[in-house]
Image (spheres, rainbow, N blue to C red):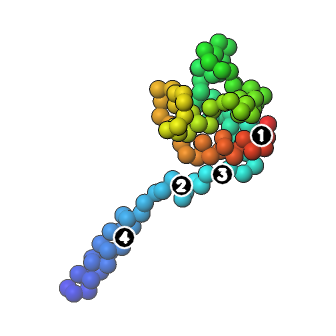
Amino acid sequence: MTKKIIFFALILSVSWLGSCYRDVEEELYPCETTGLKYSVDIAPIIKANCSPCHIGTLPTETFFGTYETLKAVMEDPNSSFLCRINHDADCPENFMPKDRSKLSDCAISKIEAWAIDYQP
């Protein structure tokens, strides 16, 4: 009888400990910010978050739906692009994406890292 109680207690303990597993996205999928390319890493972020206002045939705002146009926006010293996607309190203009949630920290980190060397 005592062996059965110990056995069930052991099984219960092991199953309880296994239920404490916790998925942390940043640990499971670290944000890769090296060797980024516009076509592979940045374009999907821009397409998913900046359309239709800044991408498409009739953008209502500054167009940056291509490598060349986004690079020009990023290199412009008067651009508030990074300020706006970071939702900086000191940013003089509206946060982007407009009327949507802030980009993920990883997406912002990728854009900022890509802006160092602008790989196509």
Who comes first in sequence, dot 3 or dot 4?
A: 4
Residue denoted by label 3: 32
From the top left corner, tell me how far across and down residue 3 is, in percent: 26, 86
Q: Are marks 4 and 2 in contact (CB under 8 Å)?
A: no
Label 3 secondary element: loop
Q: Nearer the viewer, mark 3 or mark 4?
A: 3
Mark sitting on residue 26: 2
The image shows residue 97, relative to residue 37, as above or below, that is above
As drawn, is 16 to the left or to the right of 65?
A: left
Q: Residue 97, can we see it?
A: no
Residue denoted by label 4: 17
Task: Classify mark 2: residues with Cα within 10 Å, few (<14), some (14-19) or many (20+).
Answer: few
From the top left corner, tell me how far across and down residue 42 is, in percent: 68, 37
Label 1 secondary element: loop
Label 4 secondary element: helix
As drawn, is 68 to the left or to the right of 97?
A: right
Who comes first in sequence, dot 1 or dot 3?
A: 3
From the top left corner, tell me how far across and down residue 44 is, in percent: 65, 34
Q: How far is mark 3 from mark 2, CA to CA? A: 10 Å
Q: How far is mark 1 from mark 3, CA to CA? A: 16 Å
Q: How far is mark 1 from mark 2, CA to CA? A: 25 Å
Residue denoted by label 1: 118
User: Which of the two residues, 58 or 115, is positioned nearer the viewer here?
Assistant: 115
